[in-house]
Amino acid sequence: VVLWEHEPQHQSRVRRQIVGFYESCCGDDELNVADMVQTSAKCREEMQSDPSEDQCENDLCVGRKNGAVDEEGHLTKGFAKYMPRMYPEYLTALVQKIALLCVDHLNKQFEVKIEKGKCFPAFLTGVACVKISIELVCPEKFKIQSYQCDQFRELLNEHVKSLKQNKKTTSVKIKLT
């Protein structure tokens, strides 16, 4: 698993490419995000904000309501319980392992990089960390074989390679079971 520094311009570039962010090339072809979308709508109602405003705060609200983010904006161990809901059951153990690594990594970054009073997009960054990591370490038998997915995996690998060259990654080895 490759965890990189939180730099939104890097992640958003990957999210925009080829495969939609909520599509998957590992397991099922689409992540189950219905619960997250419904919770996001409730948060918007409570916050009484326009969808284009306060996206970071809305994402934190979604994370808090799912026990994945604490009041200070840090990811909690509950994040590792929440994330498997988006994936097929047979990927649960892998998703949980990766989610815990993402929690530790992003919370360390939170302490170092984020200015007091600024919103840290912990929840959505955590979701991206898990999603991209899953795509990169997907067991062969669960990989969706398509031109689109091959292109997406190639893009992710190139992205990680460039980040490694710029020393913006942390590599973590996990045992796939």
Image (cartoon, helix red, strand yellow):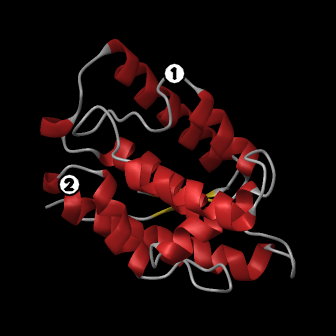
Q: Dot 1 surroundings within 10 Å: few (below 14), some, or many (20 or more)?
A: some
Q: Is residue 116 above or below residue 159?
A: below
* Residue at the spot of label 2: 91
Where is residue 143, by image quadrant? top left
Q: Is residue 5 visible?
A: no
Task: Please name whichever residue, 54 or 156, is drawn nearer the observer in this view of the structure.
Answer: 54
Amino acid carrying label 1: it is Ile
How far apart are labels 2 and 1 at the CA level? 23 Å
Kindly state the secondary structure of the residue where label 1 is placed: loop
Residue 56 vs residue 66: left or right?
Answer: right
**Quadrant, the N terminus:** bottom left
Type of amino acid at the residue the image marks with label 2? Leu
9 lies above or below 95 = above
| Quadrant into which the C terminus falls | bottom left
Residue 21 position, x and y percent, is 50, 37
Residue 144, image quadrant? top left
Residue under numbered circle 1: 18
Report the residue at 61% width, 70% height from top: 61
Foreground: 128 or 81?
81
Q: Residue furthest top?
A: 147
Above-or-below relation of 1 to 138: below
Relative depth, front residue between 140 and 22:
22
Query: What is the x, y in percent for residue 59?
Result: 63, 61
Q: Earlier in the sequence, mark 2 or mark 1?
A: 1
Residue at point 36% right, 62% down?
A: 83
Q: Mark 2 falls on what kind of element?
A: helix
**Residue 144 vs residue 78: left or right?**
left
Question: Residue 162 appears at what percent x and percent y?
Answer: 63, 39
Q: Which residue is depicted at the point 49% across and 82% down?
A: 76
Question: Residue 70: in sight, yes or no?
Answer: yes
Seen at 36% across and 21% down, the residue is: 150
Q: Residue 124 location in percent, x, y? A: 58, 57
